[in-house]
Image (cartoon, grey):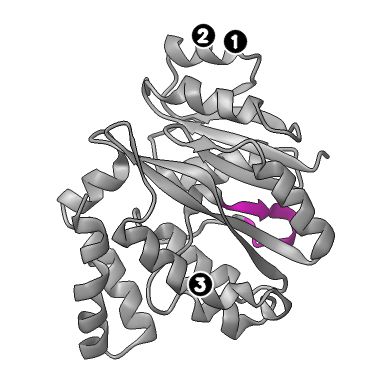
Amino acid sequence: MGFHTFAICAYGESPYLEACIRSLKSQTVPSEIICTTSTPSIYLEKMTEKYEIPLYVREGESDIQADWNFAIGKAKGTFVTIAHQDDLYRRHYVEELKKSYKRWPDMTLFMTDGVTIKDGKIHRWNLKEIIKKTLRMPLRMKGMADREFIKKGVLRLGNPVMCPSCAYRKNYLPDPIFHSEYRYALDWDCMTVLAKWPGRFICVEKPLLFYRIHDGAATKACIEDRRREKEEMELFKRFWPEPVAKFLMRFYKKAYQEW
């Protein structure tokens, strides 16, 4: 097995897929790169052939959770990053992952900071990113980042983890890693489970991810049909009494309503 795999989860014919692949190919430390899909097409076949990337097709209807678990299962690396096809990764992402693992060999989850791209422009200090960075502050105490109360405490006021930035140490975490009743908030839900497992959450507060917001994104669709709000409210209620959960949700949703 190699050290790390980028597993691109591809859907449809994203105009941003090639840029994503190029960012993965440009890493200062090379990784295995694979592409998985539940919506096969000639477009994906040609794109993966062009960049000599294996393409794995999952049978059945598209489902984010099943697709992510399928991608992790196909990866050979000890650590796996589920690369979203619309996003970009800075050249030093894998390099920083290796440095963190060398310093903290019990690391089971690696994450980074990121910046948002919307309408072709970079939004570095928007409200959403400021809130996420603030909520992640307990993880700066890396010496204590193996404690459940620290890992879970980061998640009590919302989900500050940038999902596409995560690298999962798959053989040290539950199988499957993603097991949730939710569609949008499944990563937040699953993080609360991973926090209970032995191992350290390491966050590198460097913007190593460019997270793209656009009209075709699943995130935006979940916001518009209020699915996101419903699921996140249910998760808040796991940590807090309902009146407190409603109070927190009022402020939390402001961070994404701007989009």
Locate residue 83 relative to residue 29 in the image: left or right: left
Residue occupying the point 78% across, 53% down: 99
Residue occupying the point 82% across, 63% down: 103
Q: Which residue is mark 1?
A: 49
Inspect this view and state whether residue 11 appears: yes
> Which is more N-terminal, label 1 or label 3?
1
Q: Position of residue 245 (x, y in %)?
A: 26, 82
**Marks 2 and 1, how far apart at CA:** 5 Å
Residue 103 highlighted magenta (yes or no): no
User: From which residue to which does the magenta span run?
Assistant: 166-175
Inspect this view and state whether residue 57 appears: no
Q: Amino acid at mark 3?
A: Thr
Instruction: Tell me: residue 229, above or below residue 38.
Output: below
Q: Which residue is mark 3?
A: 192
Q: Secondary structure at mark 1?
A: helix
Q: Residues within 10 Å of mark 1 (few under 14, many from 20)?
A: few
**Marks 3 and 1, how far apart at CA:** 38 Å
Q: Secondary structure at mark 3?
A: helix
Q: Position of residue 111 (x, y in %)?
A: 59, 57
**Marks 2 and 3, how far apart at CA:** 39 Å
Q: Amino acid at mark 2?
A: Lys
| Number of the label disc, if any, that sits on residue 46 | 2
Q: Residues within 10 Å of mark 2 (few under 14, many from 20)?
A: few
Residue occupying the point 39% across, 36% down: 62
Q: Residues within 10 Å of mark 3 (few under 14, many from 20)?
A: some
Asked whether the beta carbons under mark 2 and mark 1 sit within 8 Å of each other, the answer is: yes
Locate residue 104 relative to residue 156 in the image: left or right: right
Asked whether the beta carbons under mark 3 and mark 1 sit within 8 Å of each other, the answer is: no
